[in-house]
Image (cartoon, rainbow, N blue to C red):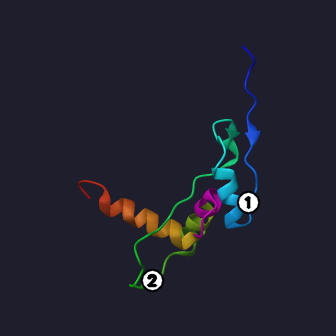
Amino acid sequence: MVPTVNRPVPEVHTDNQAETVLDQDLSDLDFSQFISAHFEFEPKAAQINMRLPQALLDAAKARSSARGIPYTRYIREVLEQAVAAPGR
């Protein structure tokens, strides 16, 4: 049996190029280059303004930077997790 070599996912820049790629057999593509993406579907209508200790803000910015996301999104995610956790 011959080992299968995965081919790279081609870059597409137009809808027509995307359609051409999607019309092919995609089973031999190397999807390891992809990174997960987080989509936020709920609109953000409310706004808050709060004061934090500088060290806490710096820590949040460092964590968000390590994850590659804006620090405001990171703070929102932490808040969402805290209110979703049972018993809190």
Question: Residue at the location (60% across, 65% down)?
Answer: 69
Whether residue 39 appears in magenta in the rendering, the answer is no
Horizontal placement of 4 versus 58: left or right?
right
Quadrant of residue 77 in the image?
Answer: bottom left
Q: Which residue is mark 1?
A: 12
Give the main secondary structure of the magenta stretch. Answer: helix
Residue interval drawn in magenta: 63-70
Helix or strand or loop: what does disc 1 sit on?
loop
**Mark 2 packing: few (<14 Cα in 10 Å), some, or many (20+)?**
few
Whether residue 66 appears in magenta in the rendering, the answer is yes
Could you tell me which quadrant the N terminus lies in? Answer: top right
Question: Residue at the location (59% across, 60% down)?
Answer: 63
Question: Residue at the location (58% across, 53% down)?
Answer: 36
Q: Which mark is residue 50?
A: 2
Amino acid type indicated by mark 1: Val
The x and y percentages for residue 23 are 64, 49
